[in-house]
Image (cartoon, helix red, strand yellow):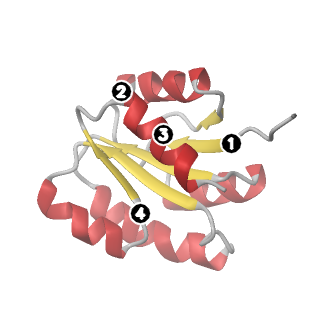
Amino acid sequence: MNQRRIKVLLGKPGLDGHDQGAKVVARAMMDAGFEVIYTGLRQTPEQIARIALEEDVDVISLSSMAGSHIPFCRKLKPLLESNGLTDKLWVIGGNLPAQDHDALRELGFKGIFPSGSKLDAITEFIRKEVK
């Protein structure tokens, strides 16, 4: 049976200049059989939303190490909504303090993966959530 591959956008928001972890996660996603579109560093909310729409991804994921994830996600959410991307799985990983997890969930991020999360946990979560 020929099954469609899960397509994931992996974005690096704002001024975050740390992408080694994102590259490791991208490799793990590819090894799990996902198609991965990696945006590279310093993306704006508008760029992330545009790429997600143009690439028709199943998953919109962010890797944030700079501590600006809440303001960035507050700007990104209405852009994803206005582009009809609310049916996509939204996930975020990186330097995400526990006190921010509820706010991220309220913004629509279903998967939250702080630094140190297991790669298998990330890929299995995505596989389970994307129908």
Nearest to viewer (mark 4 / mark 1): 1
Q: CA distance from mark 2 to mark 1?
A: 20 Å
Q: Residue 102 appears in which quarter of the rendering?
A: bottom left
Tag of residue 109: 4
In this rendering, position of residue 41 left or right of residue 107: right
Would you call the spot at circle 3 few (<14 residues within 10 Å), some (14-19), or many (20 or more)?
few
Q: Which residue is mark 2?
A: 21
Q: Name the N-terminal-most of marks 4 and 2.
A: 2
Q: Quadrant of the C terminus?
A: bottom right
Residues marked 4 and 1 touching at CB (< 8 Å):
no
Residue type (three-letter) at the residue carrying disc 2: Gly
Tag of residue 124: 3
Which residue sits at x=60%, y=25%?
30
Nearest to viewer (mark 4 / mark 3): 3
Q: Tell which of 95 and 111 is nearer to you.
A: 111
Which residue sits at x=37%, y=22%?
20
Where does residue 117 sit, x and y in percent of width and height? 28, 35
Q: CA distance from mark 3 to mark 2?
A: 18 Å
Residue 8 visible to an observer of this rendering? yes
Q: Which structural element holds mark 3?
A: helix
Q: Which residue of the protein is positioned furthest toward the front in this rendering?
A: 1
Eyeballing the image, is 23 above or below 111?
above
Q: Name the N-terminal-most of marks 4 and 3.
A: 4
Q: Which residue is mark 1?
A: 6
Would you call the spot at circle 1 few (<14 residues within 10 Å), some (14-19), or many (20 or more)?
some
